[in-house]
Amino acid sequence: MSLALLAVTLAQLLDLGTFIRMVSMHGPAVEGNPVVAHLLDDFGMPFVAVAKIAVLSVVVAVIVVLAGREGRARHRRLAATVVAVAVAGGIVGGLSNAIVIL
């Protein structure tokens, strides 16, 4: 479980870090996600970074609850699916940002 949560966190922080670098180099117009571009235009980079970390916190909490504990209901497959989607999303986001940076 700890390794899965670490992988999710690192992948999402890769996305955030490359996003910050991409926007600082090329401006907010290069962001492909219209929701993020709107938040960036209206509220600025600190808001977007805090929002990303807040969403990451919720995703980690969902994984922990789904994984369960001894004596409680467990939904390991669903927890593993959330982990896989979160890691894949972070890696794809980070790589797409890195491509724009280069």
Image (cartoon, rainbow, N blue to C red):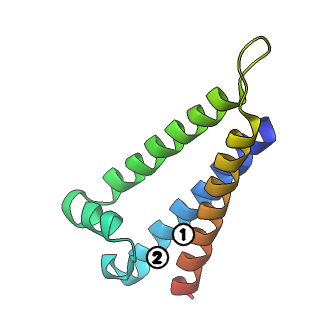
Q: Nearer the viewer, residue 70 or 95?
A: 70
Question: x and y percent of residue 39 in the render?
Answer: 27, 60
The vertical placement of 15 against 75, above or below, is: below
Query: Residue visible at 48% across and 68% down?
Result: 19
Q: Amino acid at mark 2?
A: Met
Up-down relation of residue 99 to residue 88 (above or below): below
Side of 38 relative to 32 (left or right): left
Quadrant of the frame with the N terminus: top right
Residue drawn at (73%, 26%), measured in percent from left and top?
Answer: 74
Q: Residue 34: horizontal and vertical position, in percent?
A: 32, 71
Percent position of residue 48, x then y: 36, 55
Q: Does residue 92 appear to the left or right of 58 in the view shown?
A: right
Position of 52 with respect to 88 (left or right) is left
Tell me which residue sits at (63%, 56%) in the image: 85
Residue that mark 1 sits on? 18
Identify the residue at horizontal 71%, vertical 23% (top origin). Answer: 68
Residue located beneath label 2 in the image: 22
Query: Is 95 rendered above or below residue 7?
Result: below
> Observer-nearest residue: 50 or 36?
36
